[in-house]
Each structure stands twice: as C-alpha cells, then as structure tokens.
Amino acid sequence: MIDNENTNTEFKILGMSIENLSIIYGILLICWGVIISLISGSNSFTSFIPSFLGFPILIFSYLSIKFISKKKFFMHIVVLLGLIIFIGGLDFIRAIITGNVFTNFWADISKLMMLLTGLFFTIQCIRSFIHARRIGKTES
C-alpha cells in the first residue's frame, strides 16, 4: 500500500516490495508449470509455459535487487513478462466463448491462473511505477 503520509516510502503490496513480490510470483509460476505437468501427466511443451515465463521473472527480479542502478530496466522487463502472461491467459476466454471450457481441464486451469495472476501482477507493477514516478517528481 502507498503510505500517503510519507511519500518517500517504498511501494508495498501485501507487505512486500514489488521486487520481492516478483520473485515470489516467478517461483509460483515455475512450480505451477512443473506441478501441473506432473499431475496431468502431460508430455506437452505447452504445460511448462508458466515455468518458462516464471524463470525470467525470477531472474530479472533478483537482478533488480542486486543491481539497484539497473532496477528500473529490469523491472520493466518483469512487467512486460507479466503482461505477456496475462495476454496468454486470455485464451481462457476463447474457450468460454466456443463452449470448450474445461475440455482440457489442466490446460484451462493454467490459462485461468495466468489470466488472473497476470492481471493482478501487471496492475501491481504499474501501481509501483506510478508510485516511483510520484516520488521522483516530489524529490525534484
């Protein structure tokens, strides 16, 4: 949450910095892809899509903490990946429209997860960027 009384505080969501939230989100995506692939018995490359997108989120989030001077650059890559996850999850809506929702249960659950978490994550990243911009303007 944004602390309105002290605009110099760091943006927090669920008590975490956006970088820490991003690390947790990356780990969640990696685990999700692996677990869903194992549970479903899928041999398909596509069942690992959340993992493949979570790995760079994890790496770039870590790099944004490690290299503070490049934080803005790394976090812009992270939010772009979050947006890609959200857009990929939109395929769930196509399944609803065509009446084929949950014909492939595990794939549709993954798409729904990507849709909802990708939207949440992208919104939080944008809120963080807006907060950082506001702080930058007040410090100028």
Image: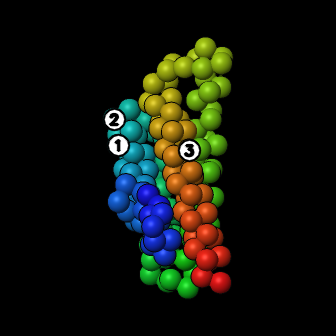
Which residue bears the numbered disc 3?
119
The reply to whether residue 71 is in sight is yes
Q: Position of residue 57 (x, y in %)?
A: 50, 62
Element class at badge 1: helix
* C-beta proximity under 8 Å, tags 2 and 3: no
Measured Cα–Cα span from mark 1 to mark 2 = 6 Å
What crowding class fits label 3: few (fewer than 14 Cα within 10 Å), some (14-19), or many (20 or more)?
many
Q: Position of residue 99 (x, y in %)?
A: 61, 14
* C-beta proximity under 8 Å, tags 1 and 2: yes
Q: Is residue 104 left or right of residue 34?
A: right
In this rendering, the label closer to the viewer, 2 or 3: 3
| Amino acid marked by disc 3 | Leu
| Position of 60 relative to 30 (above/below) | below
What is the number of the mark on residue 39?
A: 2
Q: Position of residue 72 (x, y in %)?
A: 59, 74
| Position of 82 relative to 106 (above/below) | below
The reply to whether residue 44 is in sight is no
Q: Colour scheme in the image?
A: rainbow
User: Quick one: label 1 or label 3, which is nearer the N terminus?
Assistant: 1
**Nearer to me, 98 or 82:** 82
Element class at badge 3: helix
Which residue bears the numbered disc 1?
35
Q: Residue furthest front?
A: 5
